[in-house]
Amino acid sequence: MSRRNVVTLAVGNRFWRRSAGAVASAEPDKEVESLNPFISNVQELGSLRLALGYNIAAERKGSDSLTDLDMNLRLTPINFLSFAFDGGINPGAWEITQARATVTLVDPRPITRRSLDLDFMRPNSFSIGYRYLLNGPNGFLASNANINVDNPENCTINPTFAPCLGAPNPKSLIGDIVISLFYHVTDNILVNANSVYDGINNRFIGVHAGVKLLSPCDCGTVTLTLNHTINPAKTSFSFNFNLLGLGTQKKSSF
C-alpha cells in the first residue's frame, strides 16, 4: 500500500424551516429567538456536506495530490418526499467519478396502533435510486471481484481488465438501479423487498424479499425471507420466530 499523509477539509451546512406558531423562548429576553433545532415547529429541509483531501506525500513526488471532491446532499422539501445525492468529482478534470441518487416516498399518515415489534411502527415507504461508477485503474474488480490477475485468458473473458492491451475504457463501469419497498398489507402483515438491477448487463444482480407476520395478541412474529445473489451465486431462505415482550430484540430481523 502506498504511503499516504492526507489532510482533509470538510464543510457542512443544514437548512431549516420554521412553521407558524413559534415556541416561546426560554430566555427572559423575549426578543431572543431560540435556535434549538428540536422544537416542534422547526423542520430540516436539507443538508449539504463537501469534503476534499490533500495528499502531502503525493505532492512531494510530483503526482496528483488532491482526492475526489466528495458531496453529500439531502433534501426534504415536504414530510413525505426526500432526495439524496452522494457523489465524487475529480477536481482536475471536473468529471463525476461516482454518484448515487435516491428518491424516497414515505407514507405521512401516523401509525395509531402500538406494537412491540419496531417494524410494525415504521411507515410505508418506497425508494428508487441509481448508482454510477466511472472506470478507473481498479475498475475491473467492480464487474468481477474474483478475477485471477495471473490468467491471460481474462483479456477475452473480461475485456475491461486493466492489464489487457487495447482494453476498452467505458465511461460507466457500474450503472445500477436500486428499488426498495416497505408496505403494511394489513395491521398484522408486512412486506419488505429490495432489488438491484444492472443496467449495463441488463440483469438483476440481487433480490431480497421478506414477509413478517404479527400474531393477533401482539406477542410474537414470524419472518420469512428470500435472498438471491450472483456473486457468489446463491439463493437462501430463512425462517425467524421471535417472542415479543421483555426479551424482544432491538435489531430488526427484517
Image (cartoon, rainbow, N blue to C red):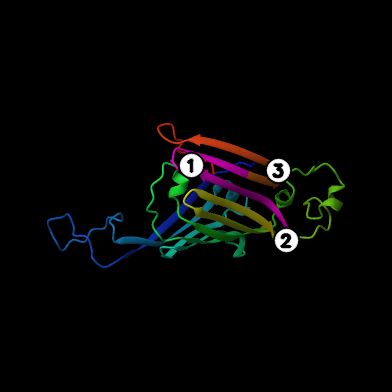
Q: Nearer the viewer, residue 202 or 145?
A: 202
Q: Which residue is mark 2?
A: 200
Q: Residue 127 location, x and y as percent?
A: 54, 59
Q: Residue 73 location, x and y as percent?
A: 48, 60
- Tell me if residue 90 can be seen: no
**Placement of the C terminus among the 4 image quadrants:** top right
Whether residue 215 is in magenta: the answer is: yes
The kind of residue on which mark 3 rests is Thr
Q: Earlier in the sequence, mark 1 or mark 2?
A: 2
User: Picture quarter containing residue 248?
Assistant: top left
At horizontal 29% and vertical 66% (from top left) the residue drawn is 19
Q: Residue 90 location, x and y as percent?
A: 60, 60
The kind of residue on which mark 1 rests is Ser
Predominant SS of the magenta segment: strand
**Placement of the N terminus among the 4 image quadrants:** top right
The answer for how far apart the CA atoms under marks 3 and 2 are is 23 Å
Find the magenta span and give its range.
Answer: 200-225
At horizontal 61% and vertical 54% (from top left) the residue drawn is 64
Q: Nearer the viewer, residue 141 or 138?
A: 141
- The answer to whether 142 appears left or right of 246 in the picture is right
The answer for how far apart the CA atoms under marks 3 and 1 are is 28 Å
Q: Which residue is mark 3?
A: 235
Q: Nearer the viewer, residue 186 or 126?
A: 186
Q: Residue 29 location, x and y as percent?
A: 13, 59
Q: Nearer the viewer, residue 80 or 55?
A: 80
Query: Is 167 drawn above or below residue 221 in the view shown?
Result: below
Q: Secondary structure at mark 3?
A: strand
Q: Which residue is mark 1?
A: 215
Q: Secondary structure at mark 1?
A: loop
